[in-house]
Structure formats: C-alpha cells, structure tokens
Amino acid sequence: MRPVVHYMMGGVSTDIHGATPLGGLYAAGEVACVSINGANRLGSNSLPELLVFGARAGRAAAIYASEQPAPSSAALAQAMDEQRRLEEQFLRKPGGKERIATIREEMQKAVEKSAGIYRSGNSLAEGAQKLRELQERYQNIALDDRSYTFNTELTAALELGFMLDVAESIVQCALHRTESRGAHQRTDFPKRDDAKFLTHSLMYRNADGTSRVEYSPVKITRWPPGERVYGQPAQAAQAKGG
Amino acid sequence: MAETITLEVARYSPERDAAPTFQTYQVPLRKDWVVLDALNYIKDKVDGSLTYRWSCRMGICGSCGMMVNGEPKLTCATFLINYAPGPVRVEPLRYFPVVRDLVIEMTDFMVKLKNVKPWIIRREEKTLSEGEYLQTPQQLDTYKQFSMCINCMLCYAACPVYGLDPLFTGPAAIALAQRYNLDSRDQGAKERMEILSQHQGIWGCTFVGECTEVCPKHVDPAGAIQQYKLNAAKEWFKSLLMPWGSK
Amino acid sequence: MRTSEVTRTTEYTPYHPRWYRSRVSTYWWLWKWPYLKFVLRELSSIFVAYFAVLTLVQIQALSEGPEAYAEFQEWMKNPFCLALNAISLFFVLFHVLTWFNLAPRAMVVRVGGKRLPDALIAGANYVAWVVVSAAVTWFLLRKI
C-alpha cells in the first residue's frame, strides 16, 4: 500500500462560468480553480464539480465563440510562429542530451520531497533550487521522435515544460505562504494565519522569465472559517453550539 | 526467473514506411510488470519514438488495447511473466487501420456507437420537481452486465465478421444499445430497433462468440446480440400479426 | 432513421493515404481453433439439410411400395452411403450440442427478478430432446 496524489486544489483561475483571465480560454474541473475547494477538497466533490462547471464552461464558451468574428490573419501568423517554435525547439533541433523521462522523474522526486503535505522553508527552498536546475536542463532535451504523425513524445515534452511551471508555482506559493492551512502544512509555521493569509495565491510569469506571487482576498459568503477539530474537542465544540 | 524478456513491437511511420515492420527490444522482466510497463520502459529509456495509447493503467479506461501474441488484450492487464521466456509480440489492434506504430484509427467505432443512440431516450423528460427516475436493484440487474463496457474495442479485434465486413456495427455498439433498451428508464427501444435490425446491424452477427471470450469486463456482447435478435424477431412477428399495436 | 440514412452515416472508413490497412486472409478461419470450430459448426447445417432431404427420399420410397423401399435400403447399405451418413450423424450431433449449449445466451428467462442459470435452460432442451425421441421411438416400435 502506498499513498497517491489526492487532488490539485489550485489550478487555472476561473470565474463561475469557467472563463479564465485570458479571453476565449475556458477551464473546468480539477485543472480549474473557481475556487470551490479552498485549501482542501472534500471527498466526492471533484466529480460533481466537473459536471456542473463543465456544463457551465461549455455553455459560456459556446456563447463567447458565437459572438466572435472570423479569426484574423494575425491569428494565423501567430499559429505559424508557434509551429516554427515547436520545430526549432523540438522537431528539428540538432544535439541535445537530456531525456524527457529523466527530467520528469527527477522533478517528481524533488516535489514529493520538498512539497509534500508536511513541508518546511528549508525543504521548499531546496525544491525551488532543484526545479530551477531542471528548467535549465529542459532547454537541452533531445527527442527521439521527429515524426509529424501522432508524435506522443512531442506532447510529453510540451507537458513536461508545463509540469515544471506548475511545480514551480506549487513550491513558490508554498514558500511565500508562512502559515498552515488545509493540505499545506508548514512544520515551521504550524498555525493558521487568517489575518495575513486568508487569500488566494496567484502566480504570474514575468516577461524576463522570473515569476511573482500576488494575492486576492477570499470571498466569504455562507461559511466563515472555523477551527477544524476531531474527537473530544469536536464534541465539546458541538456541545457549546459552535 | 530470467532478468530480461524480448519484445517484438510493430513499428510503422507513414512518412518513412510502406508497411509495418518489427523492432526487437530487451526489457527487464519484473514479476509485477505488465506489457504496458515494458512499453513505457522502452519509450522512456530506450526509444522515445515508440508510439501507443494508454491512460489509467488499471483496466478501466480502455485505451491500451493491443494484440499480444495474436490475442487482443489490455496491455495494462497482461503480465510479462506469463509470456516468459518470450518473445512477446505486440501489434496494433486487429481489423483497424494503423495510424502509427501501435495506434489505430477508431473513428469507425465512434460513429457506430453514436448511431445506436447510447443514451436514455424519453418521450417526455421529467421536470426537476418530479424528482429522480427510480429504479429497483432487480431492474438494474437486467442491464448491469452490459453497462460495464469500457469501449476498449478488443471485441472488434476478435470479431471476424467485422474484419471481413467493416460495415458491421460490431459487438460493443450493439451491447450498449441493448444496455439502454433494457434500462427501465429508457423509452427508445423502437428507435434503436429501426437502426439495428439492418443487415449491418444485429443480423450481420453469426454468433462466433470470440467477442465475449476476449472482453476484459465480462460484458458478454455475443449474448446481448443474440438476445436482441430474439427481440427483433418477436417485434417483427408482432408488427406482422398486430399492425395496429404501437409501443 | 431510414435505411438510406443509416447507410450514409455508417460509411466504409474512408481511405487515408497514410493509414495502413492489412488485408484479412481468406483462410482467417484456420488461424485460431475457436474460429475453426465456428466454421465447422456453421457447415454442420449442410449435413442437417442432407438428413432432412434423406428423410424425404425415404418417405417417397415408402410411398412407392415395398420394391422401391427395398431398393432404397440396398442403396443405403453401400459403403459410400454408410460413410456419408456416419459423418453426417457426427455433424448433426455436433450441431445439436453446440445449439443447445448456446441457447441460454440468447434466451434469458427471469423468475422473480433472478436470471435462471444457463445449465437449466440448456438442460431443459436436452430433456425435451430425449422425451420427444422416446415418444417417437415408442410410436414407431409399438405393436399395432
């Protein structure tokens, strides 16, 4: 028996219609963060979340698409640029010595070690350092598969790049969040800090390649945050009517 | 137990080849490794250009269907030690066009699946205020077996009728149609009957029965098709002898 | 959906220059034992038809009088006919066994919400076969 991944509580920031800050991009389900799950997802909520917000996002995307004019030649030029980038960086690139699987496995080990449920400033800093190294090595990837037909190695390479971005987000936001909340438990900051950190962490990529963390306040409507207790303290709290 | 086992894998790149060839690889032989583990080992460490479909690696998504030593299998559920000392021959799913290496073109199946209308058809939908559609455990029992289909298409790779006549609707699609026909909440049996009681529908089936043998989820599509045939014959007699009755 | 609509949507998967399609061999049924068994099972219907025709010929010979029937019996005794009938008997039995054993897959009988076991349905067919055969035998062999 071994533990497995529970759920991605964060994700692409969306509103309740699935619209992301990038116009025309919609997201729903585990990849999106509305956020209805907060610091930890309740059991069984992921499937209804997907059904409800999937439908909403689909409908909103359809309405958005129906209101758009035909794509301009500028859009086509952008697509051609992207194809050229993929060819230069992966399909036609000479040399390169890293294998996708090696970098991916090292990333998995680094994030599991530094950003597990229980994490500390030290472990996170180590993880951040390792990820920086892996992102540099990622630039040196060599593909075995240069085909244009159903190239799954290319998709694996692209996904690895995005996985490294996500790993960086996890580690950086955890480093900046000096408190414990839900699935994020800092051994060096074991208490919850509602004064400073009752916020969503937003991760951005700067133009120069560095990243920054910003915050947006949590909207409390019906359920104010309380103490999460089990066993005897829970019964006592219930008796008190809290 | 030997240290390694040989895999002979079909390779095909349309840009380069006119027809598939075989490439041999040596992979570690671990007691708990399945064929999919061997393929992943090859792709990660030996030859990244090996292309195949897979997803859940636990026999529920139906993506990893391939021919292993001539039999249609889910590679995530086929253990390497059962084939020791090898070699293990891995080929793309039979009777489907090959796009690349072990990847097949499955649009034909998707079209046929949609044609049989595998969803609950009702003359009138219940409003939300009327509540859910209720169903007893006995009613669930009548169709539960056919609902276990994971659309892995191993049955199509085992069906000689589908191999010889690509117009044949095929085991999985008909089994799923029967699943909805038997569902107490469904009222679309007549609609599906018109689609399926064609030559390329249920009457194309000659009850070879291999589809049931290879199904990893014990759906028994052959049984579903024969039951449908019995039903269709009954309905035909009814429409002949009592043309005034309608469903 | 009309037939013509069905034919249109269930089109032969269009030819794509980059897909590879392998031809199914004419001898596909030799590649696997279950396939061979299936083809033999289907061919057994020819022998069933032969027995039916033989019975008709026998009845016709009977109707034409004792001489014609004696001729028929002589014909039946020649070695070619004996061999043919022996093979046919084997195939007809094979036909019956496979048919009865597969019948429960098509006929699902539910009693009180539970499905009757396959052995019961197949068994019922066998019992009916024995009973009918016994009845016919008694009818033919009784003293008039």
Image: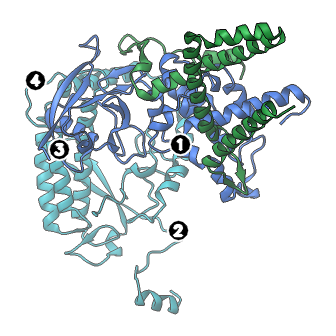
Q: Is residue B203 above or below residue A35?
A: above
Tally of numbered discs: 4
Name the colouring of the figure: by chain
**Going 46% across and 64% down the picture, which residue do you hit?**
A219
Q: Circles 3 and 2: CB distance less than 8 Å?
A: no
Q: Spatial distance from mark 1 to mark 4, Cα to Cα?
A: 50 Å
Residue A69 visible to an observer of this rendering: no
Q: Secondary structure at mark 1?
A: loop
Q: Is residue A93 above or below residue B150?
A: above
- Give x and y (percent) for residue C31: 38, 22
The residue to which callout 2 is attached is A221
Q: Amino acid at mark 1?
A: Val
Q: Pick the residue in front: A3 or A6.
A: A3
Q: Colour of chain B?
A: blue
Give the class, few, some or many, for how many residues have Cα within 10 Å of label 1's Cα (few <14, many ≥20).
many
Label 4 and label 2 in one chain:
yes
The residue to which callout 3 is attached is B29
Q: Pick the residue in front: A165 or B102.
A: B102
Residue A168 in the figure: left or right of residue B122: left
Q: Amino acid at mark 4?
A: Pro
Where residue B219 is drawn, which disc sits there? 1
Q: Spatial distance from mark 4 to mark 2, Cα to Cα?
A: 56 Å
Where residue A94 is drawn, which disc sits there? 4
Q: Pick the residue in front: C72 or A50.
A: C72
Q: Residue furthest right?
A: B244
